[in-house]
Amino acid sequence: MTIIRLRRGNKADLPASAPSGMPLWCEDTKELYIGTGNGVNLVNDLTSSALPVGIVIWFANSTLPSGFLKCNGAVVSRTAYSSLFNAIGTTFGAGDGSTTFNLPDLRGEFIRGWDDGRGVDASRIFGSAQTHQANSLYQVMNNAGGGSPGTFTIPDNGSWSGSLITAWAESYLRFRKSGLETRPRNTALLPCIKY
């Protein structure tokens, strides 16, 4: 994904020229301008060069905007979408390995910032997916106890204290009661990628 940094100011403060591709936000008119190297031009639509190929947006309509593809994991042509392929490559799947590649699949997903060496979400590969944390807990509890879904047996090996058993059992019961995922409040929008 690409981060776009906007220079903000009033229309009277827009520079006579700006570096090519530099986005400029006009506070008083609520318009977006783009630097051309010789001047600034008003950006009238999402297909403008102000938005780099590969940028992901969340669209508040179920209809796809012009110049974008749905982030639905589809396999698309490396030739027909060569600019996008050059931008993201096979990060989200190699398609058939020679003539196609995969788009990111963001349907039903939350986005998490790439750790990029910070150590908060260590060992993550850029573009990789992660499962539910609560779902992982559910699997660990069943595997640890040797039980089937809906049951949890405690292994009698001396490593489980009463407080640990209670905490795990309470977590398990809360999880089973609420369903098979945990989630914050959210709104469903259409994820799109520019090609």
Image (cartoon, rainbow, N blue to C red):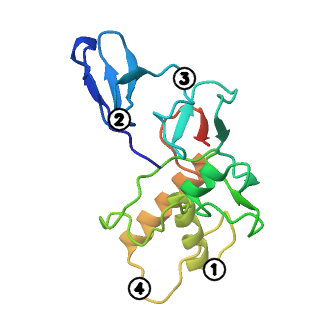
Secondary structure under badge 4?
loop
How would you rate the neighbour count of disc 3 (Cα within 10 Å): few for under 14, some for 14-19, many for 20 or more?
few
Which one is earlier in the sequence, the residue at label 1 or at label 4? 1
Which one is earlier in the sequence, the residue at label 2 or at label 1? 2
Residue pointed to by mark 2: 22
Which residue does the image show at 58% across and 51% down from the upper left?
181
**Of the two numbered discs 4 and 2 in the rendering, the one whose residue sits closer to the viewer:** 2
Disc 3/disc 4 C-alpha distance (Å): 62 Å
**Of the two numbered discs 1 and 3 in the rendering, the one whose residue sits closer to the viewer:** 3
The amino acid beneath tag 4 is: Ser
Is any part of residue 86 visible from this angle? yes
Q: Is residue 191 found left or right of 3 in the rendered image?
A: right
Disc 2/disc 1 C-alpha distance (Å): 58 Å
Which mark is on residue 146?
1
Which one is earlier in the sequence, the residue at label 1 or at label 3? 3
The amino acid beneath tag 1 is: Gly
Residue 134: percent from left, percent from top: 52, 58
- Please, is residue 167 above or below residue 56 in the view? below
How would you rate the neighbour count of disc 2 (Cα within 10 Å): few for under 14, some for 14-19, many for 20 or more?
some
Which mark is on residue 159?
4
Which one is earlier in the sequence, the residue at label 4 or at label 2? 2
Secondary structure under badge 2?
loop
The amino acid beneath tag 2 is: Met
Is any part of residue 104 visible from this angle? no
- Please, is residue 59 above or below residue 12 in the view? below
Disc 1/disc 3 C-alpha distance (Å): 57 Å
Which one is earlier in the sequence, the residue at label 3 or at label 4? 3
Residue pointed to by mark 3: 45
Q: Nearer the viewer, residue 52 or 186?
A: 52
Secondary structure under badge 1?
loop
Q: Are marks 1 and 3 in contact (CB under 8 Å)?
A: no
Residue 33: percent from left, percent from top: 39, 23
